[in-house]
Image (cartoon, rainbow, N blue to C red):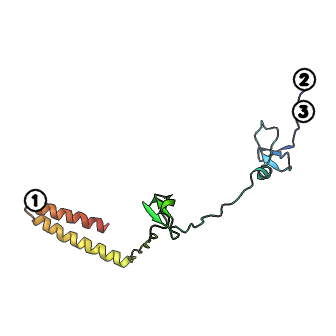
């Protein structure tokens, strides 16, 4: 003769037309669907899994002392004399080459709004002059040259 497994019924309530059931570990009320017989709240689940999988926050970026993109260089020699070809160390060549010198990027000069405005107005003025020349041009080679100059200036004016 088989015996039925006893099911424990947990306290349920209807709150704002939603069915809520108490957590089987701590008793906190949790929103559930109608077919659920027991539930565990999110806090209890987190506690259960923290024992097996403790959360370790990453420490973030740790500098290696090598410049950005060193692994993509054909050849890179660090300050200790280690030689790398495309990111792979070549121990047989250690100390045979001088360290690679990395040139710092020079920052681009910043243009003010007034300078941008001046550049655009100059470009528009030059386009106007070129369009006048275009209407007077007779030869195909002159028309092509003027049109190409106009296109270049229109890119600057945008």
The x and y percentages for residue 146 are 16, 65
Count neighbours of disc 1 (C-alpha within 10 A) and say few if under 14, some if 14 to 19, many if 20 or more. few
Task: Give the CA distance from mark 3 to mark 1.
Answer: 97 Å
Depth order, front residue of 26/100:
100
Q: Which residue is mark 1?
A: 140
Q: Which secondary structure lies at badge 1?
A: helix
| Relative height, residue 25 to residue 111 (above, below) | above
Q: Residue furthest top?
A: 1
Query: Residue 2, how many percent across, how many down?
Result: 90, 23
Rounded to the nearest angstrom, the CA distance separating label 3 from label 2 is 12 Å
Chain-order first, disc 3 or disc 1: 3
- Mark 2, other Cα within 10 Å: few <14 / some 14–19 / many ≥20: few
Q: Quadrant of the C terminus?
A: bottom left
Direction from residue 62 to residue 24 in the image, left or right:
right
Extreme residue in the left direction: 138
Q: Residues within 10 Å of mark 3 (few under 14, many from 20)?
A: few
Residue bearing mark 2: 2
The residue drawn where x is 46% and y is 67% is 96
Residue to which mark 3 is pinned: 6
Location of residue 132 in the rendering, given as x and y in whole percent from the top left corner: 15, 68
Q: CA distance from mark 1 to mark 2?
A: 101 Å
Q: Please state which of residues 131 and 140 is positioned toward the viewer in this rendering.
A: 140
Q: Quadrant of residue 110?
A: bottom left
Which corner quadrant of the image does residue 118 belong to? bottom left
User: Toward which corner of the image does residue 100 lie, by quadrant?
Assistant: bottom left
Residue 75, position as x, y percentages in the image: 43, 62
73 lies left or right of 32: left
Element type at mark 2: loop
């Amino acid at each position: 003769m088989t015996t039925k497994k006893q099911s424990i019924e947990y306290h349920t309530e209807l709150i704002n037309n939603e069915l809520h059931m108490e957590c089987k570990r701590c008793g906190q009320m949790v929103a559930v669907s109608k077919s659920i017989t027991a539930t565990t709240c999110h806090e209890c689940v987190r506690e259960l899994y923290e024992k097996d999988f403790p959360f370790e926050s990453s420490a973030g970026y740790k500098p290696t002392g090598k410049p950005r993109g060193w692994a993509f260089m054909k050849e890179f020699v660090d300050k200790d004399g280690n030689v790398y070809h495309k990111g792979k160390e070549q121990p047989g060549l250690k100390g045979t080459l001088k360290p690679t010198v990395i040139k710092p990027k020079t920052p681009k000069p910043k243009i003010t709004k007034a300078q941008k405005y001046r550049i655009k107005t100059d470009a528009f003025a030059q386009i106007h002059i070129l369009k006048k020349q275009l209407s007077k041009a007779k030869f195909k080679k002159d028309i092509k040259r003027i049109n190409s100059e106009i296109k270049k200036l229109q890119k600057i004016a945008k």
